[in-house]
Amino acid sequence: MADSETQREAVLDALDNVAERLAEEKEYLTDLDSAIGDADHGANMQRGFGKAADKREEFAEMEPNEVVKNVGTTLISNVGGAAGPLYGGSIMFASQEFEDGITAETSVAFAEAYLDKVKDRGGAQVGAKTMVDALVPAVHTYKKSVEQDDLPPLEALAKAVDAAERGVAFTVPIKAMKGRASFLDWRSVGHQDPGATSTLFILEELLATAEEYLDGEVDRDARAEDAVGRDE
Amino acid sequence: MIGLVVVSHSAKAAEGIAEVAAQMGGGNARIVPAGGDEDGIGTSPDRIREGIAEADDGDGVVVLVDLGSAVMNAELAIEMAMDSEAVIADAPILEGTLNAAVETTSKKATLDSVVERAEDARDYRKLN
């Protein structure tokens, strides 16, 4: 396990990368949200993660789990809407899994605790056209890859990101059953869920950060082609 | 006395509901509106938490909510407001707050009885 200081640096870098990515994707997320929601997801996520990233100096002396917890509370106070409690509250809750540091094992526990909290708080199951559609495949794939296939965390995370990507695609052709989009009933079909999409962006940035710290590189395009071409 | 917090996406709606309910409670009920967020329409866990602290005189608080993020942010605010005992009533926000306001002014009111009276409003019909 990397020392506590390296773990904290990795968490802070991940936070910076996520904040930067969400700022880049602000317009895109807003476009997705204006089709089936209230057009604030891009601005909300940018503001929330931006505020958290601004606290880098404040976080500089904390233990890694405390940094993660404080990212959660910052999101709760600054994201707004349902995304505040769903992202912020779940990160805050899951941060306790990192009390003894960040390892392959505790990262699986974190992912599961995060997913449980999102499902519990939001009440959505797979197929409701929400962030759960990206999270469930990502978390299940990560857990299985680490615990049963004994893959290194970086490889497991890459598989999880691929799974989340397919989950995001799955939100397009289905009808919303939860959240504001559900009020649109059949009109929600054909639109991609903003929450599932921002979840994927966050996972992609966690992967990019993990590549730096775990000293590896994953060619996602090549592997995706492998997966598609397997039965041909 | 048990306090009430009214959580609506609209600050004005929360204030208006609190106003109507205060009249039903004979002016004695402790009703705190906690609607809207920093940008206007929305709900804020920090505002709700402050509302719970303001409404609580030690006997606990019942939170009335409209929908969606109001429910999630109220749950989160309750988890963060460790010093107060607070529960959410699963009731229509206007009718539920009115019922709850009346019940809180009863000498025998408990958190359970206030929640129960608020939730009675789920079955109200407007016609016949």
Image (cartoon, rainbow, N blue to C red):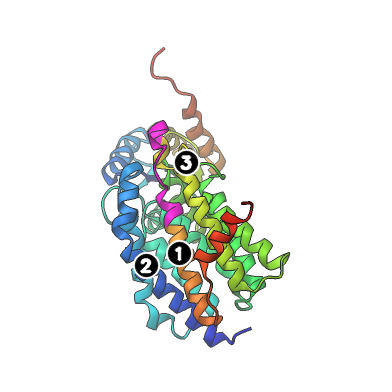
Amino acid on which the number 2 mark rests in the picture: Arg
Element at label 3: loop
Disc number at residue A21?
A: 2
Q: Residue at x 46, y 53 (%)?
A: A196
**Quarter of the figure with residue A160:** bottom right
**Residue under pointer 1:** A202
Q: Residue at x 47, y 55 (%)?
A: A86
Determine the residue located farthest toward the right in the rendered image: A148
Could you tell me which quadrant the N terminus of chain A lies in?
bottom right
Q: Does A76 appear above or below A218? A: above
Q: Would you say residue B4 is visible in this rendering?
A: no
Amino acid on which the number 3 mark rests in the picture: Lys
How would you rate the neighbour count of disc 2 (Cα within 10 Å): few for under 14, some for 14-19, many for 20 or more? some
Give the mark, 1 or 3, whose residue is nearer the N terminus.
3
How would you rate the neighbour count of disc 1 (Cα within 10 Å): few for under 14, some for 14-19, many for 20 or more? some
Disc number at residue A178?
A: 3
Image mark count: 3
Say if mark 1 contacts mark 2, CB within 8 Å: yes
Residue B93 image position (x, y, % from top left): 40, 36
Amino acid on which the number 1 mark rests in the picture: Ile
Q: Would you say residue A48 is visible in this rendering?
A: yes
Residue A4 image position (x, y, % from top left): 56, 85
Residue A113 image position (x, y, % from top left): 60, 61
Q: Chain of mark 3?
A: A
**B77 and A170: which is toward the camera:** A170
Q: Which residues are magenta?
A: A183-197
Q: Is residue A35 left or right of residue A113?
A: left
Q: Is residue A62 magenta?
A: no
**Quarter of the figure with residue B97:** top left
Residue A48 image position (x, y, % from top left): 36, 64
Say if mark 3 contacts mark 2, CB within 8 Å: no
